[in-house]
Image (spheres, rainbow, N blue to C red):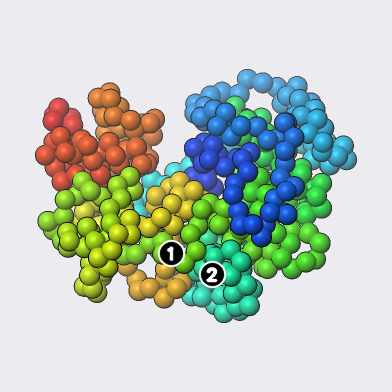
Amino acid sequence: MRSTLLGIAATANVAAKLDTARARAMLGRRIPVPAICAALLAITISTPALAGAADNYPPPRNGCVNTANFDTWLPGLRKDALAAGIRPETVSAVLDGVTPDMSILKSDRGQSFFQQTFLDFQAKLATPNRASSGAAKIRARKATFDAVEKEFGVPPEVITGFWALESDFGAGMGKKSILRALVTLAFDCRRSEMFRDQVLYAMKIIDRGDLQPDEMIGSWAGELGQTQFLPVHYYNHAIDYDKDGRRDLIRSEPDIIASTASFIRSLDWKPGEPWLQEVRLPDSLPWDKAGLDIKQPRAEWSKLGVTYPDGRKLPADATPISLLLPMGRLGPAFIAYANFDVYLKWNQSLNYGITAAYLATRIAGAPVMGRGNGQPVGLDMAGLKELQTILSKRGYKVGEPDGKLGAGTRMASREAQKKAGLPADGYPTPELLDAVRAGR
């Protein structure tokens, strides 16, 4: 995916989308979609060689070393493809003469884009140009967007927000051979089972007549089209909306719009409901109530003094929402609705999810967000790794100490802040690191 700034966005998108937890949530599983798509999804792969239980994918084997010989390994993949019912000519077109691309493995193991702060991350991605381009795309394709929203219940702004971040509306889909990338990742020891299945789905896309092998050009991680679908999602959710006989997410904007809406709806999008709104916070807020794992009625947040940026009160109703503080109590603040969960199913990174959701609100006309109530100071990669290591030794579930600020680290930080008598907003700071170093 991409070069220069386009490459930054794409690397971010691919990195988190391919985390095993997301793979467990989606790969090889039939995901509910609107009844209107039932006929299309009836052709979902169902042979034992392809369907597989998604929960059986092992976690990434970080740090593993490849010891197998590629030429010895490849015949097994060929055998699996033929056993899955893929046409021999397709198997030959994909696998004859293929060699591993070691630059793919370097990209897969060297992802660092998500170590930026939220403010830095969103400034690079949720740009004014992308907001205006999204609005222009909606105007240019109004009839299609109107029809798709009526069918799937997904607003145009949500679709164009993802479309802008994933490829800048097709300007940066990537330049790698998808098939070679997938075969390389299937051979690699880190996530071989997951990508083996992706190779087979890519072959199924060819068998179905949607794309030819030489058209399958995209990101280093094997994603296809202008909204960057993994082959399993392309196969299960791509729609021939322009009725030209194939599902083309590389060139056909009607197909792209409808297919993206179908996939979003399959992730449990709730039509007619919001997804994210910026808010302002009082200094006296009980900070330990912030976090995606905590939901309270809007009325409760209103009582606590949470308001819209212009000072208006939140509705005093029972709608469940979470308070998101991507950079702690001193940074920007948002309330997240049930539909925000879809963003984290699309991409597990909280920074990406909030950025994509915020960009959708900007395309819809929301003002530029504020920067918070102060100057939040977080930890660099080394400091965060040290904090994760200490917290892990104390029994907190932070996962692998990798210097990345994920959900586990945020929740563990919140509990450690409580214990140390610090404001428990879940944002790791030098102050928290000093406290845990001192045994507090």
Q: Measured from the top left, where is residue 209 in percent x and y?
A: 82, 53
Neighbour class for label 1 at 10 Å: few (<14), some, many (≥20)? few
Q: Nearer the viewer, residue 438 or 300?
A: 300
Neighbour class for label 2 at 10 Å: few (<14), some, many (≥20)? many
Q: Measured from the top left, where is residue 196 in percent x and y?
A: 67, 33
Image-based side of 305 in relation to 247, left or right: left
What residue appears at the point 54 percent right and 77 percent down from the top-left corner? 136
Q: Which residue is mark 1?
A: 273
Q: How many marks?
A: 2
Q: Measured from the top left, where is residue 144 in percent x and y?
A: 64, 73
Determine whether 432 is above or below 367 in the image. Answer: above
- Closer to viewer: mark 2 or mark 1: 1
Q: Secondary structure at mark 1?
A: loop
Res 2 visible: no
The CA span between labels 2 and 1 is: 13 Å
Q: Amino acid at mark 2?
A: Pro
Res 419 visible: yes
Image-based side of 204 in relation to 415, left or right: right
The single residue placed furthest to the right in the displayed view is: 89
The disc, 2 or 1, on the residue closer to the chain's N-terminal end is 2
Q: Quadrant of the C terminus?
A: top left
Give the quadrant of residue 174: bottom right
What residue appears at the point 45 percent right and 46 percent down from the top-left corner? 348
Give the quadrant of residue 331: bottom left
Q: Which residue is mark 2?
A: 156
Q: Secondary structure at mark 2?
A: helix
Q: Amino acid at mark 1?
A: Glu
Q: Nearer the viewer, residue 352 or 123?
A: 352
Determine whether 121 is above or below 87 in the image. Answer: below
